[in-house]
Amino acid sequence: MGDRRYAIIFLLVSFIFASPSFAQKEATTTDGSRVILYPDGTWKAITKDIETIPIDHPELPKPKPFELILTHTGYILSYNTSRHIANWAAYELTANETTPLLGRTDHFIPDPLLTSGSASNDDYKNTGYDKGHLVPAADLAYSAQTMEESFYLSNMTPQVPGFNRGIWKRLEAQVRQWAVDDSAVYIVTGGVLTKDLPVIGGNQIPVPKFFYKVILDYTEPEIKGIGFIIPNKASKEPLQHFAVTIDSVERLTRIDFFYQLPDAQERIIESMTDLSKWRWTTGEKR
């Protein structure tokens, strides 16, 4: 045990002085053990490599009492009937599904699974806000059914045009690239629904001040996760500027993401974000 402790101390000191900016990192000691190193000098052993296990719909957040879940072909969402907006939308995106077979319809229609509490097109009329997709149409362009579903009003949120057509669109394109890179990714996305938000339309649709996405790559050999929290406004900042841990998004939204993962996996994946493990598209700085 003494030799291993000295090996970890040696590794920690070497790592600090070798790194221009020290954040929590995964490393291997001289005896081959895997550990997580933290900025305060502490460390935590990883007892075994992260391996995937079969999970039915790992993208789904932990359900809450009386939550209305709408299951569509291309995605599943939690709908808040009192606020007429989705709490979250979740889906798997595979590499094959990123190849578009259909163009956008731009035909916004009520969700047929909603019997009450639905937003309307009139709620957005002359407000200055876009009907912004949570699950983008480009992620559902692989069939006529999923394309139609992408324009359900339950999948829409009020977004500033410069945000919807700018940095949010860039993030959507980046996630599609990761689906290609990693064969498939699991995504949960939505607006941060805090109290006292401004509202639009006769149905009083809340306008989120922030939007989030959390992404899980659950394909070996490199399993990883990343989160984003972005203000609902135009921005030319690189996407990395808004990258955070999934834990950070959970604290802000009070949603328990990827809860079906084994506890040890969930702790590691959701507490760490290593930007170097993700391939960033041209125009995004590392």
Image (cartoon, rainbow, N blue to C red):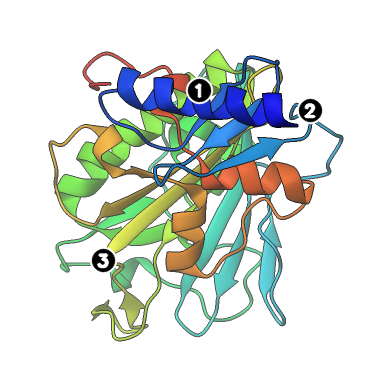
Q: Which residue is mark 3?
A: 209
Residue 51 in the image: above or below residue 193: above
Query: Where's residue 76, x and y in %?
Result: 65, 53
Q: Which residue is mark 1?
A: 10
Amino acid at the residue labelled 1 = Phe
Residue furthest to the front in view is 2
Amino acid at the residue labelled 2 = Glu
Say which quarter of the image contains residue 220: top right
Tell how many labels. Answer: 3
Residue 132 in the image: above or below residue 81: above
Label 1 and label 3: CA atoms lie apart by 45 Å
Q: Residue at x 47, y 21 (%)?
A: 277
Q: Residue at x 75, y 26 (%)?
A: 49
Left or right: 275 in relation to 259 = left
Q: Residues within 10 Å of mark 1 (few under 14, many from 20)?
A: few
Amino acid at the residue labelled 3 = Lys
Say which quarter of the image contains residue 120: bottom left
Callout 1 secondary element: helix
Residue 31 in the image: above or below residue 263: above
Question: Which part of the image, by quadrant, shows the C terminus?
Answer: top left
Q: Residue at x 83, y 44 (%)?
A: 56
Q: Nearer the viewer, residue 81 or 214?
A: 214
Label 2 and label 1: CA atoms lie apart by 28 Å
Q: Residue at x 57, y 46 (%)?
A: 270
Callout 3 secondary element: loop
Q: Which residue is mark 2?
A: 51
Q: Earlier in the sequence, mark 1 or mark 3?
A: 1
Question: Which part of the image, by quadrant, shows the N terminus?
Answer: top right
Label 2 and label 3: CA atoms lie apart by 37 Å
- Mark nearest the camera among 1 and 3 is 1
Callout 2 secondary element: loop
Residue 100 in the image: above or below residue 150: above
